[in-house]
Amino acid sequence: MKAIKAKVYGKVQGVWFRKYTKDKAEELGIRGFVRNEPDGTVYVEAEGDPQALAVFTAWLHEGSPLARVDSVETEPSEVKNYQTFTINK
């Protein structure tokens, strides 16, 4: 099990980014959460199988169909044993 924190920059709010992120996470068996930040970015905490997490992280650079991802900052994180993947407000 591996875990990351990610901050996604660009046009990532109001474009269904969180919903698509949740769908991709569930497809890959990733657990954690996604939320909009006041500065217009999207913040993600994700954990799971290292290979699935690599696929998920690569997907964050694409995002939802209406999104425009300018950059993604990721860093390793501690495993918190999330049970599901949720959209946090």
Image (cartoon, helix red, strand yellow):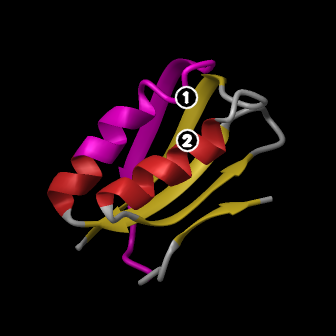
- For residue 18, above or below residue 83: above
Q: Give the range drawn in magenta.
A: 55-80
Q: Where is residue 43 in the image (x, y as percent from the top left)?
A: 61, 48
First reached walking from the N terminus: tag 1 or tag 2: 2
Taking the spot 47% from the left edge, 80% from the top edge, the residue there is 82
Query: On the picture, is 67 further left or further right than 79?
Result: right
User: Which secondary structure lies at badge 2?
Assistant: helix
Q: Residue furthest left?
A: 51
Q: Where is residue 33 in the image (x, y as percent from the top left)?
A: 57, 62
What whole-number distance in Å separates the C-alpha atoms at marks 1 and 2?
6 Å
**Is 46 or 76 nearer to us in this picture?**
46
The residue beneath circle 1 is 64
Q: How crowded is mark 1: few (under 14 residues within 10 Å), some or many (20 or more)?
A: some
Q: Inspect the image, locate mark 1, and give the three-letter code of the amino acid beneath it.
A: Ser
The residue beneath circle 2 is 20
Q: In which quarter of the image is residue 12?
A: top right
Query: On the picture, is 66 further left or further right than 61?
Result: right
Q: Are marks 1 and 2 in contact (CB under 8 Å)?
A: yes
Taking the spot 74% from the left edge, 31% from the top edge, the residue there is 13
Taking the spot 34% from the left edge, 45% from the top edge, the residue there is 56
Q: Inspect the image, locate mark 2, and give the three-letter code of the amino acid beneath it.
A: Tyr
Q: Position of residue 62 (x, y in %)?
A: 43, 24
